[in-house]
Image: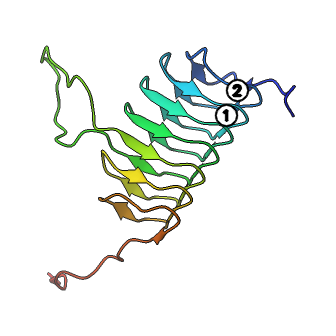
Amino acid sequence: MGGKIMKIHKLSDVQSQDIGKGTQIWQYCVVLAGSKIGQNCNIGSHCFIENDVVIGDRVTIKNGVYVFDSIYIEEDVFIGPNVTFTNDIYPKSRRGQDRLPVSFPKTIICKGAAIGGGATILPGITIGEGALVGAGAVVAKDVMPNTILHGEAAKVIRPKSIV
């Protein structure tokens, strides 16, 4: 297994030179130059990986996941399809402004954690080692190691008026 070379689909824009052996990056991905991706990872199609990102060994990132600055993913992590990571506590358009934030809160997904499809992870969160975040959950607080977390289902606020 150590002799496997990385495979990058020709329809991806991969600028990083720091990608481990055996890693596969599928089509329509953008991987910026400052990012680091470990060995034997699988990055699904339509993913975006920003500069200040570190991804450990044997990580699976399914289709449609954007990993923004200040997000660190340790080894043996599973990220389901369309998981949403956020990195800015007070997001706003900064077009035309000279100053961008110097840094964003650090989000850490610890070794062996798994995040189900469609979950949203707010900035500055740590998801503990071996934790499982259920599909569609909104994670607003740290998740302790080896715990299972799932989100609340949508609830009716009021009946829709029929006009």
Question: Which SS class for mark 2?
Answer: loop
Disc 1 target residue: 26
Picture layout, residue 42 above or below residue 69: below
Residue 117 percent coordinates (x, y): 52, 59
153 on left or right of 88 = right
Q: Which residue is drawn at the image coordinates 40% and 61% (left, top)?
A: 143
Who comes first in sequence, dot 2 or dot 1? Answer: 2
Percent position of residue 1, x then y:
87, 34
Three-letter amino acid code of the residue under disc 1: Trp
Instruction: Please give left or right for residue 2 compared with residue 95 in the image.
Output: right
Q: Residue at x 43, y 22 (%)?
A: 51
Residue 92's place in the image compared with 86, above or below, is above
Q: Identify which amino acid the numbered label 2 is placed on.
A: His
Q: Dot 1, crowdedness within 10 Å: few (<14), some or many (≥20)?
A: many
Give the percent coordinates (x, y) of residue 91: 19, 39
- Residue at image coords 49%, 69%: 147
* Residue drawn at (61%, 24%) of the image: 12
Residue 82 higher or lower than 38, as above or below: below
Foreground residue, 111 or 78? 111
The quarter of the displayed image where residue 97 is located: top left
Q: Mark 2 = which residue?
A: 9
Quadrant of residue 89 within the rendered picture: top left
